[in-house]
Amino acid sequence: MTTPHVGIVGAGTMGNGIAQAFAVAGFPVTMTDIADAPLQRGLKTVDASLERLVKKDKMSAADKSAALGRIRTATSLEPLHAADLVIEAATENLDLKLEIFGRIDQVAKGDAILATNTSSISITRLAAATKRPERVIGMHFFNPVPVMALVELIRGLQTSDATYASAEALTKRIGKTPVKVKNSPGFVVNRMLCPMINEAIFALGEGLATAAEIDEAMKLGCNHPIGPLALCDLIGLDVELAVMQVLFEGFKDPKYRPAPLLVEMVEAGYLGRKTGRGFHAYG
Ligand code: NAD
């Protein structure tokens, strides 16, 4: 079986996690971003994540350096011409993703599959920005990628059976579990998860309990491994807000309106773990 070359657009929380998952499974990876700084941060995150596995005796030092050696970086999209699968994991913004899809469509090989890790944006809409809509699919990984088993595979209206079959096979080859989902705002998991987090932020804004108390209550009362506000800090408050806006606009239903406190915290730049401050503080 040949090993496809995987291109990744965006080296942030998700992009570097996806790069790690493919590199550990033996795939050559090219990870791109707009500047060298996010690429270096991404590589550092992968290095630290693999080092934890080495320390726990779950990976050898040789395998770690081989995996790191499979990840190349670039500050332009041109090197993605070598990729058989390109996964877009850039900032959650429709206009930005439409522009990126138009550009990777020009750069990538004619038979390459273009996937997006979007949390909520229509795959059909992104596919329509390319000249190969049948080769566009949603591959929605979960955070933290190296740990989470699920990949939602989302078919746009135009996605071909062959594209779906390839994405499904690749998902399994990196040890993840695919679940087939129809194209709809927020797909399946975020349709339920993000409104729950949003409701926790309403509760915090209304002073029902402190952030620590809300998280403790949901952990102990619902047996969740992490509280909703701590999870929002992990996901990124900007990502949570973007998903709620897509749900609100997509369904035109006020039950999805973003909590005012969420909007204000994003305005303040309190985006969670990645900025050191969200609903909780990080050192
Ligand atoms: P992030 O902010 O951590 O990283 C985004 C990266 O994209 C940044 O490094 C940024 O510099 C880069 N970028 C922006 N414009 C670019 C461009 N034109 N070309 C290349 N790179 C560009 O965001 P994230 O949390 O990694 O989210 C990325 C995508 O994954 C979003 O679509 C998000 O909805 C989705 N997602 C996020 C999570 C999560 O828990 N954070 C989970 C599943 C899916």
Image (cartoon, grey):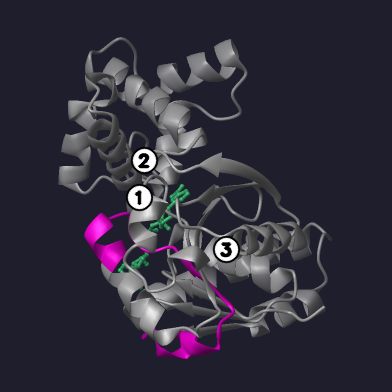
The reply to whether the C-beta atoms of the residues labelled 2 and 1 are less than 8 Å apart is yes
Residue 215 visible (yes or no): yes
| Residue 184 position by quadrant | top left
Residue drawn at 67 percent across, 64 percent down = 166
Q: Determine if residue 143 is in view.
A: no
Write the residue at 55% across / 30% down.
226
Q: Earlier in the sequence, mark 2 or mark 1?
A: 1
Callout 3 secondary element? helix
Q: State left or right for residue 106 relative to residue 112.
A: left
Residue occupying image coordinates x 66% and y 49%: 147
The image shows residue 187 at horizontal and vertical percentages of 46, 39
The foreground one among 263 and 208 is 263
Give yes or no for contact between labels 3 and 1 (Cβ–Cβ under 8 Å). Answer: no
Question: What residue is pinned by disc 1?
Answer: 276
The answer to whether the residue bearing label 1 lies less than 8 angstroms from the nearest atom of ligand 1 is no
Q: CA distance from mark 3 to mark 1?
A: 22 Å
Q: Which residues are magenta?
A: 74-98
User: Callout 1: 10 Å neighbours few (<14), some, many (20+)?
Assistant: few
> What secondary structure is marked by label 1?
loop
How many labels sit on residues? 3
How would you rate the neighbour count of disc 3 (Cα within 10 Å): few for under 14, some for 14-19, many for 20 or more?
Answer: many
- Residue for badge 2: 281
Q: Nearer the viewer, residue 105 or 50?
A: 105
Q: Residue at the location (60% across, 63% down)? A: 163
Disc 3: which residue: 18
Does the stretch in magenta take in 40?
no
Task: Give the quarter of the figure containing the N terminus.
Answer: bottom right
